[in-house]
Image (cartoon, rainbow, N blue to C red):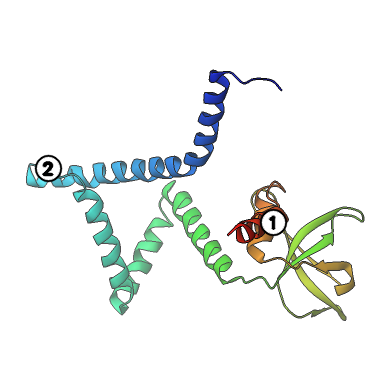
Amino acid sequence: MEKKTLLQILKRYFITGLLVTAPALITFFVFGFIFVKIDGILGGLFKLWLGIEIPGLGFIALVLLIMIAGFLTSSYIGRKLFKISDSIFTKLPFVKTVYLTVKQLQELLKIRKSIVFHGSVLIEYPRKGIWVIAFLSSPKPINIAGKLTYPIFVPTTPNPTSGFLIFADESEFIRLDIPFEEAMKIVVSAGIINPDENNNEKQKSIESD
């Protein structure tokens, strides 16, 4: 058996620690960057008015402005003002491109939140002999051109928010006896995460207790 050097052991610990802490570090970095930028923009205005710099005041002001906007849009006058501002932003050169893109993303998120899948399946796609994990969009078959078929969403890897919608007979797919979350983990991880291994580890942990 090859004996590992101290440098190899430290390197392994460093890589393992990096993989464990990377999500948290990146999250803190992104939110910290956004906080500093927003606080710097609005905080600079307060500094001009008050003559002193108060850290965090710009960010707090943004939160209050968003809450005020939400309150105003719930009233008739607020909705009218929103429509006016919307028409202005959609007519401004360059600005309208960013504005409309953000609006489209918002609409897309609203649609996706309302989508509920009704089970995970295994289906041969795009040809016989190749199997992919997919999700039932409806618990019951729907009539398409006189044929009862199930709408099935085939997600892409590693971004499952995009994919393909196909219609298949019940005999053409296999229902999976695993939770939606576990099936989605397989898709997102490109098959690296195996739910069977996770279940075995949980079972061993229960038995050891």
Residue at x 70%, y 47% (from the top left corner): 190
Instruction: Identify which amino acid the numbered label 1 is placed on.
Output: Asn
Residue labelled with disc 2: 48
Instruction: Identify which amino acid the numbered label 2 is placed on.
Output: Leu
- Checking the image for residue 200, the label placed there is 1
119 on left or right of 168: left
Q: Percent from the top left, x then y, of residue 74?
A: 33, 76
Would you place residue 3 above or below residue 163 in this image?
above
Choose the circle earlier in sequence order: 2 or 1. 2
Q: Quadrant of the N terminus?
A: top right
Res. 176 image quadrant: bottom right
Crowd tier of the residue under label 1, counting other residues whose Cα lies within 10 Å: few below 14, some 14–19, many 20 or above: few
Q: Farthest right residue?
A: 128
Quote the CA–CA distance across marks 2 and 1: 62 Å
Crowd tier of the residue under label 2, counting other residues whose Cα lies within 10 Å: few below 14, some 14–19, many 20 or above: few
Element at label 2:
helix
Residue at x 45%, y 41% (from the top left corner): 26
Q: Nearer the viewer, residue 179 or 45?
A: 179
Res. 39 image quadrant: top left
